[in-house]
Amino acid sequence: MAATSLWHIKGNLGDLIAYVENPEKTIPKGTEDFFNVFSYIQNPQKTADGSFVTSINCLKQTVLRQMILTKQRYGKEDKYIAWHGYQSFKPGEVTPERCHEIGVKLAQEMWGDRFQVIVTTHLDKGHLHNHFCFNSVSFKDGKKYNYSKAERQRLRDTSDRLCLEYGLSVIEHGRKAPSRPVWLDEQSGKPTRYNIYRADVREAVNGSRTVEMMEKYLRRKGYLTDFTGKHWKIRLPQYQHFTRLDTLDERWTPENIGRSLGTRASFGNKRPTVNFAPELPEELRVYVPFQRTSHIYRLFLYWEYQLGILPKGTTYQPTSPFMKEELRKLDTITAQVDYLAKNRIETLEDLLSARKTIQSELDTLTAQRTKLQNKIRRASPAEKELLRGKKQVSTPI
């Protein structure tokens, strides 16, 4: 099984040329992504000292210069200057050699007839994955690469076909992954929109006897529901698009939900409970709901209720998703207020002064990190370990 993705890198070719002609200069502002990609994908620690690095239509030692010459030849030196993508495999499913072989074949079929490409295989993670970086301008006709929906599908289809040829699994029902900030929040258990959805749907499934009761439960919590068709969907009114239940959890198909309903049902099947007052004698705590009682006992319970011994106003009110989101905003505001109190910031001038100090420290650390990054590129293997340690210390938090 292999997942694929591709995205563009912006920059200015004039800055790239200035950098290549004078390597002592720091990385030009606005082109950091371009240089970071080349430094990252060819990292010897990730690629077994360069054993899994292959170039197509160029030499890997001079790939940057060759890409620049191609752009100059056709006069296309701005906007998108390169494309960066990956092909990631399931842990334990493929060897490094096979992974790199598949990656090179994929690059050859996708871009090898028109573009200069460099392919690397990274071994530093639990899942082996290939990286692709290729020129945005074709050396053959000078046309720029257009990553359309059809091209995205072709990339996935080609990758799946190669996986099948090598006896590997493929993703049957792919779906768009959440953005990285959302994914990190979900992994850490923060109350993102989707985590709130999951908690409420799980509560509705566990507490309802029928589909109608489950849908009613979610509507009472403020959701708009669509339980028609083979994919059930929900959304909150402030969002434009519905979210499928089987996207939140692949087990939440209509068939599986139907089998799960009623096993531990409470909503629509819950008997009322009575919380007795602490001072009520033990021998009087004998009220059993839904059982016929004598007239005298019913009168006794009536007066207990009127006197306030039995609880009043126990109508169930589910927590609204709107309230959960407002609480999340309140947590953010609370953190900001705590920061202001901790640093004794009382006026706007104090806040701007603190911001200026932090920005100055950040600029200093960023400059140090950039210089170290440049030194790492030109250092010997023995010096790189020491420089990387210094780089970690100077990395802005």
Image: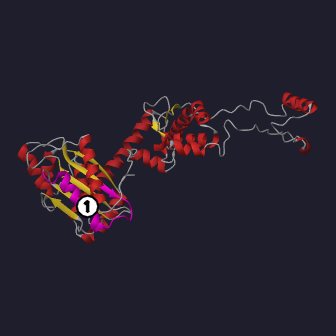
- Residue 103 magenta: yes
Q: For label 1, count other residues whose C-alpha is less than 10 Å away and answer few (under 14), some (14-19) or many (20+).
A: many
Residue 195 in the image: x percent, y percent? 51, 43
Q: Is residue 174 left or right of residue 148?
A: right
Q: Is residue 136 above or below residue 330?
A: below
Tell me the SS state at disc 1.
helix
**Residue 26 appears anywhere in the view:** no
Residue 146 in the image: x percent, y percent? 19, 42
Q: How many marks?
A: 1
In the picture as drawn, the residue positioned furthest to the right comes out as 296
| Image quadrant where residue 321 sits | top right
**Residue 331 appears anywhere in the view:** yes
What residue is rendered at 43% in x and 47% in y? 183
Tell me how the rendering is colored: secondary structure
Q: Is residue 224 above or below residue 154?
A: above
In-front residue for pair 144/98: 98
Identify which amino acid the numbered label 1 is placed on. Answer: Ile
Residue 392 in the image: x percent, y percent? 36, 60
- Residue 97 magenta: yes
| Image quadrant where residue 390 sits | bottom left
Q: Is residue 255 left or right of residue 387?
A: right
Q: Which residues lie in the magenta part?
A: 87-113
Q: Is residue 228 above or below residue 157?
A: above
Instruction: Give the residue at mark 1.
Output: 102
Q: Is residue 230 left or right of residue 310?
A: left
Q: Is residue 79 left or right of residue 246?
A: left
In-front residue for pair 199/47: 199
Residue 282 in the image: x percent, y percent? 89, 45
